[in-house]
Amino acid sequence: MLAESVWILTLVSLVLLSAVFLFVIANSGDERDYSEVQKKWYAIRSKWLLFLFVVGVIVTWATLSPYPITDQHAAADADTTVVKVVGHQWYWEIDNTEYSAGDTVEFHVTSGDVNHGFAIYDEEDRLLTQTQAMPDYVNKVRHTFDRPGAYRVLCMEYCGLAHHAMLAELTVR
Ligand SMILES: [Cu+2]
């Protein structure tokens, strides 16, 4: 649906833009004094710029608040469960894998060897959240488990022969 709308919008824009080009080409031989027209459109252009600026600020604010990436420097709230995660070739070492529905868990993710990708999937294999597991760094990623179920942790960064076997299960009761 979205792809179809974008496709139609692209075609319509293409036709409109072509019409403008054809109009300009058709009238290019015509010598007229355009200074008045120029003045008028320069005024419209500055208003248009202001309009785009305001729209840009509103769209940025609306889509980035709340900011989707976990604050890496803030301490976890008192009601947040902190869980340490270490990626290894080729398994996950996870401090605690059982939570209750409604729990907000902040995973502190690192690696014991090479880079891995820590990713949590729900029962329908939808990606819920992910971060990199990097040696000597701790990346924090916070997730609230709304529903009980069996969640899966998979590695998202190719890390060697048994990369595909890097599975772990999180249970939410
Ligand atoms: Cu891996």
Image (cartoon, rainbow, N blue to C red):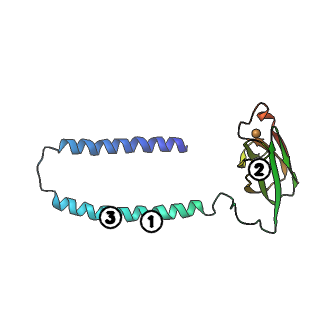
In primary-sequence order, the first of circles 3 and 1 is: 3
Q: Looking at the figure, which quarter contains the N terminus?
A: top right
- Image: 58 above or below 136: below
Given the current orientation, which residue lies at the most extreme top position?
Answer: 161
Given the current orientation, which residue lies at the most extreme bottom position?
Answer: 78
**Which disc, if any, is residue 110?**
2
User: Which amino acid type corresponds to the residue marked 3 in the rendered image?
Assistant: Ser
Give how far across and how far down residue 22 sits, in percent: 25, 41
Considering depth in this image, is 102 or 130 the residue closer to the camera?
Answer: 130
Are discs 3 and 2 less than 8 Å apart at CB? no
In primary-sequence order, the first of circles 2 and 1 is: 1
For label 1, the SS is helix
Q: Residue at x 82, y 60 (%)?
A: 82
Q: Which residue is mark 1?
A: 54
For label 2, the SS is strand
User: Which amino acid type corresponds to the residue marked 2 in the rendered image?
Assistant: Thr
Give how far across and how far down residue 7 sits, in percent: 47, 40
Q: Which residue is mark 3?
A: 46
